[in-house]
Image: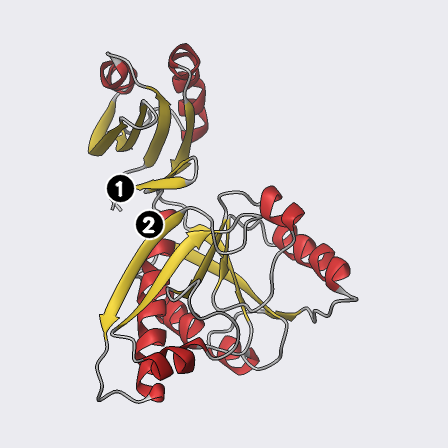
Amino acid sequence: MKADAILTLSCPDRPGIVAAVSQVLFEHGANIEESQQFDDDRTDTFFMRIAFSIAEGGPSVQEWRGLIAPVAEQLGMEWSIHDAQRPCRTLIMVSRFGHCLNDLLFRWKSGALHIDIPVIVSNHEDMAPLAAMYDIPFVVIPVTKETKIDAEIRLREVIAEYDIDLVVLARYMQILSDDLSRDLHGRVINIHHSFLPSFKGAKPYHQAFARGVKLVGATAHYVTADLDEGPIIEQDVVRADHRMTAEDLVSAGQECESRVLARAVKWHAESRVLLNDDRTVVFS
């Protein structure tokens, strides 16, 4: 990535926002490598993402935070600056379906995702051999109705121990508590099939097959206390027809889930996703 830092911001829309931010960057020797913006008429909110390079000997990323702060306060911004060279430290959680995990690991290892994966967490042992192939620590945290509170305490410890920026639920088949969902707001991505609310419960693809569905899809979203109703980051579909078996639908669905989740993780890691109440702005 050519840029050294990425500034993302949102604020009430008004004239002069771009000029004010660009002036600060110019005055301190930054060069804008990429800039995207969006004005949401629904909420009268302005969103912007600027990737910029820093002149040799120029301000550090931490110093840039101090330089941007006065303008941000003046314009009422919610904002952040990230080191564009630092990979997003990502904890992946999985249960017994490994297709999304396998896909993320391959993309990470091949350099397609700007992330580090320092640890994988599961409530089962099944994916331990896959983690071992990539030489990644694999932490098993069993979850039952009786141990759920203790399990989340242990999960919080792992998140702190590995300095985690992002948690990815790669077909992790447990529901996070409301408290944990709130504490990790905007930092947990989940993937599920797009049949909801039509085919809930076990074997949704087999339920869909029985109804003769013509589309198989997947949705990646941020996790909130409202189950599977968090702000959507990415979706995709695959057409189905009468020739496909239930197993064909499962295979198509898993492939769709994998690529949708990978896109969501990629865009989050590159600071391309901004929260907009119950929606997202995605500068893809």
Q: How is the image coloured?
A: secondary structure
Between residues 253 and 101, which one lies in front from this camera angle? 253
Looking at the image, is 124 positioned above or below residue 235? below
Residue found 30% across the figure and 86% down from its top: 248
Residue found 37% across the figure and 59% down from its top: 219
In which quarter of the view is residue 185 placed? Answer: top right
On screen, residue 69 versus residue 162, left or right, reads: left
Looking at the image, is 147 positioned above or below residue 48? below
Q: How crowded is mark 1: few (under 14 residues within 10 Å), some or many (20 or more)?
A: some
Q: Which of marks 1 and 2 is nearer the N terminus?
A: 2
Residue found 44% across the figure and 50% down from its top: 88
Q: Badge 2 is on which residue? A: 267
Residue 229 picture location, percent across and down: 47, 51
Disc 2 residue type (three-letter): Trp
Q: Residues within 10 Å of mark 2 (few under 14, many from 20)?
A: some
Total marks shown come to 2
SS at mark 2 in the image: helix
Q: Is residue 41 visible?
A: yes
User: Mark 1 touching mark 2, by CB under 8 A?
Assistant: yes
Disc 1 residue type (three-letter): Phe
Residue 172 picture location, percent across and down: 54, 67
Residue projecting furthest to the right: 146
Looking at the image, is 110 positioned above or below residue 152? below
Looking at the image, is 123 positioned above or below residue 5? below
Q: Badge 1 is on which residue? A: 283
Residue found 61% across the figure and 56% down from its top: 176
